[in-house]
Image (cartoon, rainbow, N blue to C red):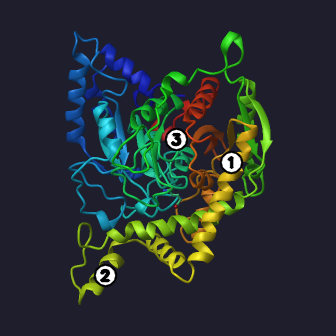
Amino acid sequence: MTDALHHRSITAHAAALRAGEYSCEELTRHFLARIEKSERLNSLITVTAEGALAQARDADRALRQNGGDGDSAGALTGIPLVHKDLFCTRGVLTSCGSKMLENFISPYDAHIIEKLGAAGAVSLAKSNMDEFAMGASTETSYYGAARNPWDEARVPGGSSGGSAAAVAAGLAAAATASDTGGSIRQPAAFCSLTGIKPSYGRVSRYGMVAFASSLDQGGVIARSAEDAALLLREISGFDARDATSLREEVPDYPNLLNGGGGGGGSPPLSGMTVGLPKEFFGDGVAEDVAAAAQTAAEQLQKLGAKICEVELPNSAAAVPCYYVLAPAEASSNLARFDGIRYGHRAAKYADLNDFYERTRAEGFGAEVKRRLLVGAFVLAAGYYDAYYIKAQKLRRLIAEDFARAFEKCDILAGPTTPQTAFALGEKLGDPVAMYYSDIFTNAVNLAGLPGISIPAGFDRAGLPVGLQLIGRYLDEASLLRAAHQFQLATDWHLRAPENFS
Ligand code: GLN
C-alpha cells in the first residue's frame, strides 16, 4: 500500500490542487522528475516537458480564478496524463511505435487529446506501444521493448504497454490507450491497473491511427474505476468526424458508481447478476489466475451480486476469427503508408513500384508485415469467401453468444488473460502463442461490447492478475459500478510495484 503523491487517485489530486496543498506545476515537475529516473522502463517515446509545464501553469491559473475556489476548473484540471503514441497530438511526434512514422509531427489533435486538453489535463508524454498497435507485449515497437514495473524482466503487456507501465510506475496519474483485441485490458491486467475499453462507437476514433477500424476503440488505463469513470465521461460522446461515433447520451459515470442496489441498506450490488463463462475457467488458464478470478467473483457475490454460470460456445473461434478480420482491415488501413504523402520514404529506388516496395519494406517491422500479408491474402479474390466471409459469419455467432448470455446476467466476469506477465522475448518467436494471450479479450471487440480489467490479486510469483468484466452494449456504467464496489472492498488496486512505490 502506498500513499505516495505519484500513486494518488485523480480525485485526491483534484481535491489537493483545489485546496492549494500543491500546485499543478509542482505535481507536473514531480512526475517529470520520476520520468527522468525511470528511463530504463522505456515506457515513453516522447516527453513533452515544456508543453506540460505550460499546461500546468494554465491549470494553476484556472484553479486560482474566482477567488481561489477553482470554480472555472473541472475534475481533470491539472491532472498529468500520458497518451498512447497513436493519438495524434498537434506539433508532437506521433510515431505509432513505427519507423514508418518516425518523422510524423501531427498537424492536429485526436478527439481524445482535444477533449482531455479542453478539460484542463496536462499531457506529459507519448507512450510506447507495439508497432501500429499490433502486439501483446510492446516488444514490436520500433523504439524497443517496454518493461513491466512489477518485474523488469517481463513485458508490461501490449499494445498499450507503455501507457500501463507508466501509470504503474507512478510516472503519470493515468493514461490514454486503445484496444482492438485487448490492448487496454491485457496491459492493465499485467500491470495491476484498471483499464476500460468502451463500447464500439462510444469514443470517437478521430485522430487515432487506424489498425482495424471495426474493432479499434480508444479508452483509458487508470489506477481505479473511479479515475477511469472521470476520464471516460470526458472522452465519450458524439463526434461528427468519426462516422461510427454514436449520438448517444453519455451517462454521468462518476455519479453512477454507487447507484443501483444498496438502497435501504441492501448490499451495493444487489440486483446485479454476474455470469461466469465456463470457457473462461477451462484448460490453459494458470491455476493462480483461475483461483484469483474465482475469489474475485465470490467477492462480487458478497457485495450482493448473484452469480450464475453461462456459456460462450464459440469462444474458441475468437482468436482465429480476429486474426482474419484484423489483418484484413489493417492491410487496407495501412495502404496509405506509401512514402508519398507522409511517413518514411525510401532514399534510393528504380521506379515507382520499387519506391513503394522499398519504402514499405524499410518502414514496417516484421509483425506488421506479417499482418499485411495475411490481410492481403484473406481479401484476395480466390480466398475472400473461404476466409474473410467465413470470419464475418463467425463474428456474428460470437456476438450472438454474448447476447444469449446477457439474457441470464447483467455482466460477465472471468480472468482477463490466461497467464500473468510473461518474460521479455518469451513469445516473440511464436506469434500464435502471443496471439493467444488475448484469448479472453478478442471476442469482446468482435462483439463491440465494453470491457474492463481490474486488479484481482497476484500469482505465486508476485505478478498481478486481472479480472475482466464484460458488459452489454453501451452499459459501461454497470462495469464501472461493479469495479468500483469491488475496489471499495479490496485493496489490490492500491498496491504499487516495490521499485516504484
Ligand atoms: N494483441 C492483439 C493484436 O496483436 C490486440 C492488439 C490491440 O488491441 N491493439 O492484434
* Residue appearing at x 68%, y 63% in the figure: 317
Q: Mark 2 = which residue?
A: 358
Please, what secondary structure does the residue beneath circle 1 have? helix
- How far apart marks 3 and 1 lie (CA) works out to 21 Å
Q: Within 8 Å of ligand 1, the CB of disc 1?
A: no
Mark found first going from the N terminus, 2 or 3: 3
- How far apart marks 2 and 3 lie (CA) works out to 38 Å
Of discs 2 and 1, which sits in the foreground?
1
Q: Amino acid at mark 2?
A: Arg
In the depicted structure, whether residue 325 falls above or below residue 183: below
- How far apart marks 2 and 1 lie (CA) works out to 44 Å
Q: Amino acid at mark 1?
A: Phe
Mark found first going from the N terminus, 3 or 1: 3
Q: Position of residue 501 (x, y in %)?
A: 47, 34
Q: Quadrant of residue 246?
A: top left
Q: Position of residue 304 (x, y in %)?
A: 73, 24
Q: Quadrant of residue 485?
A: top right
Q: Amino acid at mark 3?
A: Gly
Residue 195 is tagged as 3
Q: Are marks 2 and 1 in contact (CB under 8 Å)?
A: no
Q: Within 8 Å of ligand 1, the CB of disc 3?
A: no
Residue 402 is tagged as 1
In the depicted structure, whether residue 58 falls above or below residue 154: above
Q: Can I make out residue 419 in this image?
A: no
Question: In front: 245, or 66?
Answer: 245
Please, what secondary structure does the residue beneath circle 2 have? helix
Q: Can I make out residue 72 in this image?
A: yes
Of discs 3 and 1, which sits in the foreground?
1
Instruction: Specify few, some or many for label 3: CA neighbours under 10 Å numbering under 14, 14-19, or 20 or more.
Output: many
* Residue appearing at x 76%, y 49% in the figure: 281
